[in-house]
């Protein structure tokens, strides 16, 4: 069953993560990242929601995951 609202950690560059409630819709997720989304699964209960074009449009790197930023 799809949750209407999901709890996320919002992580901005050079800032501490903040707990944030996000509507579980494509539109809300795109607004949160400022563009097209990509979702990277880390394990069964955790994923990263990110701007799919972030590197192409020159967004500042945020956190390192494995060998990528």
Image (spheres, rainbow, N blue to C red):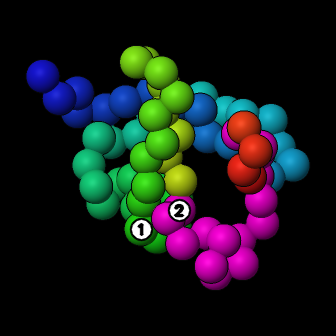
The answer to which quarter of the image holds residue 56 is: bottom right
* Mark with earlier residue (2, 1): 1
Under tag 2, what secondary structure?
strand
Q: Residue furthest left?
A: 1
> Is 63 within the magenta?
yes
Q: Residue furthest right?
A: 14
Pick the front one: 12 or 64: 64
Question: Visible in this render: residue 31?
Answer: no
Q: Residue at x 23, y 27 (%)?
A: 3
How far apart in space, not on screen, are marks 2 and 1 (Cα)? 6 Å
Give me the disc on residue 51.
2
- In the rendered structure, are the residues bearing label 2 and label 1 in contact, judged by CB atoms less than 8 Å apart? yes
60 in relation to 68, above or below: below
Q: Which residues are magenta?
A: 51-65
The answer to which quarter of the image holds residue 19 is: top right
Q: Residue at x 42, y 18 (%)?
A: 45
Q: Residue at x 29, y 41 (%)?
A: 24
Q: Position of residue 59 (x, y in %)?
A: 71, 71
Type of secondary structure dominating the magenta stretch: loop
> Is 59 within the magenta?
yes
The residue where tag 1 is placed is: 36
Image position of 46 (left or right of 10):
left
């Amino acid at each position: 069953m799809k949750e209407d609202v999901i709890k996320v950690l919002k992580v901005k560059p050079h800032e501490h993560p903040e707990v944030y409630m996000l509507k579980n819709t494509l539109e809300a997720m795109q607004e949160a990242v400022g563009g097209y989304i990509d979702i990277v699964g880390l394990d069964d209960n955790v994923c990263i929601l990110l701007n799919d074009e972030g590197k192409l449009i020159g967004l500042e790197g945020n956190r390192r995951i494995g060998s990528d930023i």
